[in-house]
Amino acid sequence: MLSNEDSDRLEAACSETVGQALRSIVYFTEDDFDQVHLTDYLSAEADIAAFVDNEREGFHRVSTHEGSELGRYEYTIRRFERGYLVRVISDSKGVFVTTNQLPTEEFDELASAVERVMKTWNE
């Protein structure tokens, strides 16, 4: 999936942005996924495939919203009882990052950091 260098850049960008609030990072495409980061206190046995399948719906949703009066799609945020999920999609690639609670503006910073790293993959 991702090269070690790309994984390291993604993990560093997320970690620098949200610090100890970082829980996990998953890179995904239509066909595959790669867990880039998992915080020690989370179970490595968790079924992330179900989350990936759900977030893959975003590939279709992004194109559905093109030309909307809301403007260009930037990212999706989901709130759960014990954390948050931020999803960024660019072309045929996606990343979702799970975090502990953060101030709202930090989600913007996190999504921007992920997007900047993803842009380097297209170069």
Image (cartoon, rainbow, N blue to C red):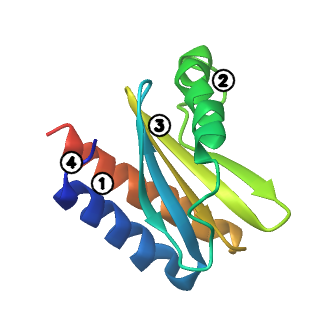
Spatial distance from mark 1 to mark 3, Cα to Cα?
A: 12 Å
- Residue at image coords 40%, 78%: 16
The residue under label 4 is: 120
Mark 3 is on which residue type? Ile
In the figure, 5 relative to 123: above or below?
A: below
The residue under label 1 is: 117
**Element at badge 1?**
helix
The residue under label 3 is: 89
- Residue at image coords 38%, 26%: 92
Mark 2 is on which residue type? Glu
Query: Do the residues under discs 2 and 4 have CB atoms within 8 angstroms?
Result: no
Query: Which label's residue is closer to the chain start, 2 or 1?
Result: 2
Mark 1 is on which residue type? Val
| Residue closer to the observer: 118 or 42 | 42
Label 1 crowd (10 A; few <14 / some 14-19 / many >=20): some
**Element at badge 4?**
helix
Query: Do the residues under discs 4 and 1 have CB atoms within 8 angstroms?
Result: yes
